[in-house]
Amino acid sequence: MKVLCFGSLNIDYVYDVPHFVRGGETLASRSLHAYTGGKGLNQSVALARAGMKVYHAGAIGEDGTFLLELLREAGVNTEHVEQLKDVRTGHAIIQKDESGNNCILLYGGANQSITRQQIDRTLAAFSAGDALVLQNEISELGYLVERAEAAGMTIVLNPSPMDDSLPPLLGSVDYLLLNEIEAAQLLHIPEASAPEEMAKRLQAQFPGSTILLTVGAQGSLYAGEETILRQSAVPVQVMDTTAAGDTYTGFFLSGVLGGHGPAWAMKYASVAAAIAVTRPGAAPSIPDREEVLSRMKEI
Ligand code: RIB
């Protein structure tokens, strides 16, 4: 079984701020750092550092070579990443507040230049039983899901950022990994709803999907056809929550696709995400398998 992550590659510009800027307000940031990021790239790095062989597909501009280098250093196969002329690499403007929380503004750039031809070229190298990991930061996502389903691939989706294009695709998804904000948007209920209720309702609404719901400090929930599992969050001093969800996704998938049960995979993922939030940046904050396994023994 091969794992293909087809998704965004971003340059993350992270601004440290006392609070998120409000409409009409001018706010001075305290510092600026540029990191490798993008939900797609982060998930590929997490899968690779968790011990999976992973292929990444996507697009960057000529200014994005360092993103390719980071993927290769992590052991990710990049033969399906295309470097385009006349388009900038995607980027994210991230405000990080004093509690380590963030808000993210995306510029799609090359991520929005994915074509049906690139999708066809890439999927030709994969077959039934291979896994496809997706987020919602690239163009032609609907076509990609349609072709992957026709090819018999296992489809994993992190529906972020949420928009109206996603609900029609969800009937084709095998694993749906999302946070409470995305769950509330999908279910049209308040974000403060009880997590277990959200997970059950998602499973009922999308019965072909296994649901993984992450709820920050409240941990995570798994909802399968007849099973509900809960995993508490590992308490840590939070520095930067960027890519915590991507880290969880990569480590959880590496666990279940690698043959472990969902309870073990949830613990593996929770420990990995807890380590990631103690470090700055997106991809640079993602730990490797050895560090996570060693921390799991202490818990
Ligand atoms: O999930 C975090 C990621 O979201 C950041 O790295 C940013 O690039 C956006 O894609």
Image: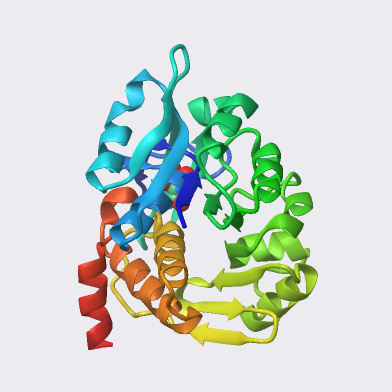
- Residue at point 43%, 26% (across, down): 82
Residue 109 visible at all: yes
- Residue at point 27%, 40% (across, down): 72
Residue 32 visible at all: no
The one of 185 and 291 positioned closer to us in this rendering: 291
Question: Left or right: where does residue 96 sit relative to residue 110?
Answer: left
Q: Position of residue 88 (x, y in %)?
A: 44, 21
Q: Position of residue 273 (x, y in %)?
A: 37, 67
Image quadrant where residue 22 sits = top right
Q: Position of residue 299 (x, y in %)?
A: 28, 87
- Residue at point 61%, 86% (across, down): 228
Question: Left or right: where does residue 27 sit relative to residue 138?
Answer: left
Image quadrant where residue 32 sits = top left
Q: Position of residue 196 (x, y in %)?
A: 64, 83
Please say if 4 is above or below 143: below
Please say if 108 is above or below 128: above
- Residue at point 51%, 40% (across, down): 105
Question: Left or right: where does residue 86 sit relative to residue 137?
Answer: left
